Amino acid sequence: MIEFHFELDFQLINEPKYSDWVNRILTSEGFEAGQIDYIFCTDEYLLEINKKYLNHDTLTDIITFDYTNGEVVSGDIFVSVDRVKDNAQRFDVDVNNELLRVMSHGLLHLMGYGDKKDEEVVLMRSKEDEKIKMFHVEQ
C-alpha cells in the first residue's frame, strides 16, 4: 500500500496518479509494493529526523528508512518540500519535476540503488530520468 502524509501545508494533486506511478516504477524493476509511506515535511522537520536517527546536522531533501523484504518494497520516505523548491530554483527546473526526481530517488534506494560512488550516481540519475518520464505516460 502506498500512502502519502503531509506534515505541512502541501498536497499532491491527484494522489491516485502518484500511487499508480510508484506501482509502475516498482513493476518496471521487478518489485511489488509493501507498505510505502511518503511523508512530506519542512526542512526543520527533516533536520530533526536527520539529527535524531542519522547523527547528521545538515539539511537534505530526502531521508529513506528501508523495510524491504526480498521483492516486496516497504519503507518510509521523508521528503523536504522546502529543499525540493530550493533545488528546483537552484537547478532551474520545474518544481513538480524536482519533486518526481526526489520521490523516485527514495524509491530507487528502497530497491537497492545507491549513490555513494560516481558510477552509482550516474546510474541513479539515469534511473530517475527514466522513472520521471513514466509519470507523464497515461495508463
Image (cartoon, rainbow, N blue to C red):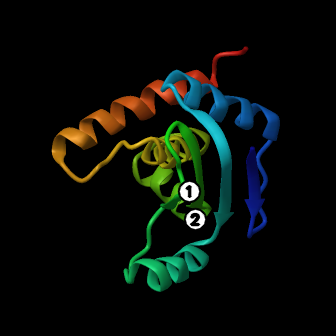
Q: Is residue 139 visible?
A: yes
Q: Is residue 1 left or right of residue 79?
A: right
Q: Residues within 10 Å of mark 1 (few under 14, many from 20)?
A: some
Query: Which image quadrant: the N terminus?
Result: top right
- Three-letter code for the amino acid on which mark 1 is drawn: Lys
Identify the secondary structure beneath mark 2: helix
Q: Is residue 75 above or below residue 133?
A: below
**Residue at the spot 46% in from the left edge and 45% down from the top edge:** 105
User: In the rendered image, which residue does mark 2 sit on?
Assistant: 82
- State the image coordinates of residue 79 (x, y, percent, origin top left): 58, 60
Residue nearest the viewer, comparing 6 with 95: 6
Q: Residues within 10 Å of mark 2 (few under 14, many from 20)?
A: some
Mark 1 and 2 residues: CB-CB less than 8 Å, in contact?
Answer: yes
Tell me, for residue 117, which label it has, or none: none
Q: Is residue 50 above or below residue 16?
A: below
Tell me, for residue 85, which label it has, or none: 1
- Three-letter code for the amino acid on which mark 2 is drawn: Asp
Residue nearest the viewer, comparing 29 with 99: 29
**Residue at the spot 34% in from the left edge and 38% down from the top edge:** 124
